[in-house]
Image (spheres, rainbow, N blue to C red):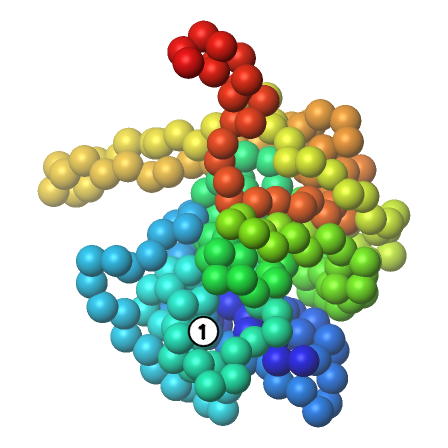
Amino acid sequence: MRILITNDDGINAPGLRTLTAIASEIAGPKDEVWTVAPAFEQSGVGHCISYTHPTMLAQLDDRRFAAEGSPADCVLAGLYEVMKDSPPDLILSGVNRGNNAAENTLYSGTIGAVIEAALQGVPAIAMSQFFGPDNKDLDDPFEAALVYGAATVRALLDNGIWTTGAYPVFYNVNFPPFSAAAVKGTRVTPQGRRPGVNFSVEPQSSPTGRQFMWVRGGDQRVPSGAGTDAQANLDGYISVTPMRADLTAHDMIPKLQGLLG
């Protein structure tokens, strides 16, 4: 199996080393793992692409490249340049430092990469490691992802539902904020929403008097509702969420057709 990996934390991120180990285990000794990752951190860029300016691509090693662009740019570079003669069978994104569950999903460059992969017709899985007081100070805070990552990917490859069509399914996996020994299992969950949790800005003035703003996140340990992704993670479970890039509110179509048609 030929696997392309990327992330949004950057080419030197520790989570990418974890993902490399996971991908290598899946690919096996006779197959290939290729890396195209952002040269610099691209957290929070979502499904952004560098549409209005060129992206520099640099080869760092055998099958290892850095792109001065977004995670979605990296997928495009992998498909149409780096691996154009032998495309990947699978694209993996992560392992993100911090969860991409609940509302975080909508901002995530890690998710943006697999959205682009799915739109290009390649099976794709995003993986993120929830951080919290029980794992942030471990020797390896990505321990849960490292121990369970390959098995989770294999389970999805063997038993997951991989739809085709205009908006194929991709998968969002979040590992709980605990040591590997404390992980209770896996739950298939919908995307949740942490009530009252939003991004905000904190203004600050520079020594020269200029005004700047820092973007601030909300409390990640707020319950997101029974049976949803972030809640499953806080309860000690790996969450697996099937997703599509179709943003249509399908439940509203019939009523609106009656009101506006």
Residue 212 picture location, percent across and down: 23, 38
Which is more toward the observer, 19 or 92? 92
Residue 93 picture location, percent across and down: 56, 62
Q: Which residue is mark 1?
A: 79
- In the displayed orientation, state which residue is furthest to the top: 259
Residue 32 picture location, percent across and down: 62, 85
Binning the other alpha carbons within 10 Å of mark 1 as few (below 14), some (14 to 19) or many (20 upward) gives many
- In the displayed orientation, state which residue is furthest to the left: 208
Which is more toward the observer, 36 or 183? 36
Q: Is residue 249 shown above or below 190? A: above
Q: Is residue 61 shown above or below 256? A: below
Q: Is residue 2 left or right of residue 258?
A: right
Amino acid beneath label 1: Leu
Residue at point 42%, 14% (across, down) = 261
Which is more toward the observer, 218 or 244? 244
Residue at point 68%, 56% (across, down) = 162
Residue at point 74%, 39% (across, down) = 189
Give residue 222's quadrant in the image: top right
Residue at point 49%, 32% (across, down) = 248
Which quadrant, please, contains the N terminus? bottom right
